[in-house]
Image (cartoon, rainbow, N blue to C red):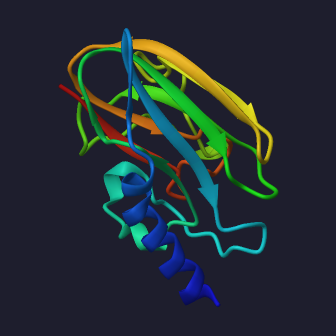
Amino acid sequence: MKHFVNTLAAATLALGALSMPALAASDGVVVQVKLWDAGTNMETYTDHRIINNVPRYKDSMGIMVSTATIPAGEVTFQVVNTSADIEHEMVVAVLPDMSAGLPYVEDIARVDEEADGVNLGEVAELAPGASGSLTIRLEPGTYTLYCNISGHYASGMWIILTVE
């Protein structure tokens, strides 16, 4: 069963961007965001943070986006929590160095949102099946979308976004 869930998660990640096209808004871009997990019976893995280069098929949670590259300017993230039973959120952060990842506080298993650029905006705590949106202006650079509920980021709940 674990292999099936991992294979399903990998296939979902691979196909997710294909099934959700980015929408052009009159004054910016709309990015569709899906927050997912393998359910309450999933086997969790440890330390799938950005810097650890763990194969993504092992992730027990994740974020899918309609496009991973967008133009600079105003962007609206339309976020849906597709989980059947777990709360998630989406936070936008600057990611200046992939090899350093985000500042992580081990004892609470969360990203330090007080650090500079780590929380540019968020769609906070979405119940299973709930949705929300966030509109912000992004300059060219590398960003990450991540869930900062305890343990979720390290379980693979992040994705890289490039702004050109």
Where residue 70 sits, quadrant-wise, is top left
The quarter of the picture where residue 46 lies is bottom right
Q: Residue at x 46, y 27 (%)?
A: 92
Depicted 155 relative to depicted 149: above or below: below
Quarter the N terminus occupies: bottom right
- Residue at 52% across / 40% down in the picture? 33
Relative to residue 17, is residue 161 depicted above or below?
above
Residue 134, horizontal then vertical, whole percent = 56, 20
Quadrant assignment, res 73? top left
Q: Is residue 114 visible?
A: no
Image coordinates of residue 140 in percent, x first then y, are: 20, 19
Determine whether, in the image, residue 42 is placed left or right of residue 69.
Answer: right
Above or below: residue 40 compared with residue 16: below
Tell me if I can see residue 52 in this picture: yes
Answer with left or right where residue 129 lies relative to residue 66.
right
Please tell me which residue lies in front, 156 or 66.
Answer: 66
Asked whether, in this view, residue 159 is left or right of residue 135, the answer is: left
- Residue 151: % across, % down: 63, 51
* Image quadrant in which the C terminus is located: top left
Q: How many marks?
A: 0
How far across and how far down the image is residue 65, in percent?
Answer: 43, 44
Q: Residue at x 69, y 27 (%)?
A: 124
Q: Nearer the viewer, residue 75 or 26?
A: 26
Please tell me which residue is depicted at 52% across the width and 70% down the height of the picture: 9
